[in-house]
Image (cartoon, rainbow, N blue to C red):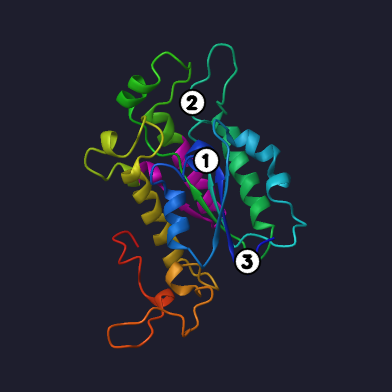
Amino acid sequence: MVGPERPQFVLFGSSIVQFSYSNEGWGALLAHIYARKADIILRGYSGWNSRRAVQILDQVFPKDAAKQPSLVIVYFGGNDSTQPPATGLGPHVPLSEYIENVRKIAIHLKSLSEKTRVIFLTAPPVSDEQIRAHVGDLIDMVRTNESCRIYSEACLEVCREMNLEAIDLWTATQQIDNWETVCFTDGVHFAPEGSKIVVKEILKVIKEANWEPSLHWRAMPTEFSEDSPYDPVSPEGKTVNVSELDLLGSFPWE
């Protein structure tokens, strides 16, 4: 255990979560934004679907843990939406089961504590041309924009029923010009431009949510932010508390 104790934000999902710290990813951006405010904890499992997520919920999020997360951001759905091969193997999960799995994940996370907040990310769109260029015939796993839309809408509907926050990445991503070429590295995983969209939408939800305490980065205290004689000195000869400076600048997506 490393102190001081901070709020924990857990990113839980498949490869879009696991890879979110690379290539200027959205997980790395959140860690930068919440530096000295919250710990961003990665629980990403490349290739996983909602069925496998349900199986390990108790291990990743034990109900008897001494400290529970303040926020869990969940992403499953893209792998679930892939078309099943003739062998019956692979990550495909039928839509009806996916809906129940989302509900099971939500129920478990909501039971962790009264202060644990949950945001679901829906399946984003895919760039068919990039997928063909990067994967080709290496993997027998067909993922289409239409199947992602169907699973995205199903996730949104469950979250509406359960009064949970959800982000429609399928729609948000496609608002960008040339999204098929600028938002992804391989047709599925986010390039820096795509990650900015994810962060923008997450911060918007956090800012607008009626949560007490607020989890928006500007509303959270900065660790060890008191004035010190060891702070840098300005040209006027006065110390400058750099912990309170807006070193991050104004985010165009906040």
| Residue ranking furthest to the left | 177
Query: Label 3 sits on what residue type?
Result: Lys
Q: Which residues are magenta?
A: 151-171
Lower sequence index among marks 2 and 3: 2
Depicted 81 relative to depicted 241: above or below: above
Query: Label 2 sits on what residue type?
Result: Thr
Residue 167 visible to the viewer: no
Q: CA distance from mark 3 to mark 1?
A: 25 Å
Between 250 and 230, the residue placed more toward the observer is: 230
Residue 234 x, y percent position in the rendering: 31, 82
Please tell me whether the stretch drawn in magenta is mainly helix, strand or loop. Answer: helix
Q: Is residue 71 magenta?
A: no
Write down the residue under mark 2.
Answer: 82
Query: Label 1 sits on what residue type?
Result: Gln
Disc 1, SS: helix
Q: Is residue 165 magenta?
A: yes
Write down the residue under mark 3.
Answer: 115
